[in-house]
Amino acid sequence: MADTKALYQEVILDHNRKPRNYGRLDHPSHKAEGHNPLCGDHLALALDLQGERIAGIAFEGESCAICKASASMMTATVKGKTREDAETLIREFREMATGELDCGSYPHHLGRLTVFAGVRDLPTRVKCAILPWHTLRAAIHSQASTSTESEADPMHAPIGDA
């Protein structure tokens, strides 16, 4: 258990200090902005969909370390994947973060993203980890913006007091 927490902290700190795919994307085909009003996280996500494949993806914004690390790992994971693959990852990540998916008991496609499984034990941080995934879903579906608190958002998940 201590090794898992240490790995989680190490990954979060690494991706917060050196986020992958951070910055602007030239000529994106899809864009969305995401906001977590509970803590102030704000992300802008741009992607270049070529056919059904995510050829390029980038993000920027102001957010906490968990949100930035989640966005960094998300962009690295979905780059080169199909829209359908990305939708599967979005669903599985959300289910893992909210405790609906036990990564040790069920098959999944999350790979290294399972380092975020422990966030389910931190209810106020779950939405920080999920915000980039909300924003990716919005971009894929050509929605200009999304929020972790939007009742109309199919990713909306009330979690404890968060």
Image: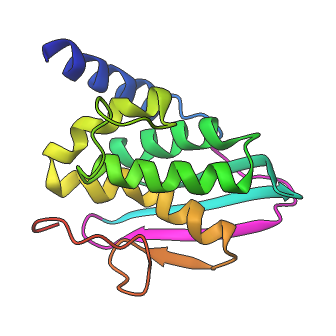
Residue 64 seen anywhere in this rendered image of the structure: no
Of residues 37 and 151, which is closer to you in this image? 151
Q: Quadrant of the N terminus?
A: top left
Residue furthest bottom in the image? 152
Q: Is 34 covered by the magenta stretch?
A: yes
What residue is rendered at 46% in x and 37% in y?
108
Percent from the top left, x then y, of residue 53? 81, 50
Of residues 25 and 93, which is closer to you in this image? 93
Main SS, magenta residues = loop
Above or below, 42 relative to 111: below
In the rendered structure, which segment of residues is drawn in magenta?
A: 22-39
Above or below, 13 relative to 156: above
Q: Quadrant of the C terminus?
A: bottom left
What residue is rendered at 63% in x and 79% in y?
143
What residue is rendered at 50% in x and 54% in y?
90
Percent from the top left, x then y, of residue 22? 62, 43
Residue furthest left in the image? 161
Percent from the top left, x then y, of residue 126? 26, 54
In the picture, residue 84 is in which quadrant? Answer: bottom right
Percent from the top left, x then y, of residue 32? 62, 70
Residue 2 seen anywhere in this rendered image of the structure: yes
What residue is rendered at 68% in x and 66% in y?
140
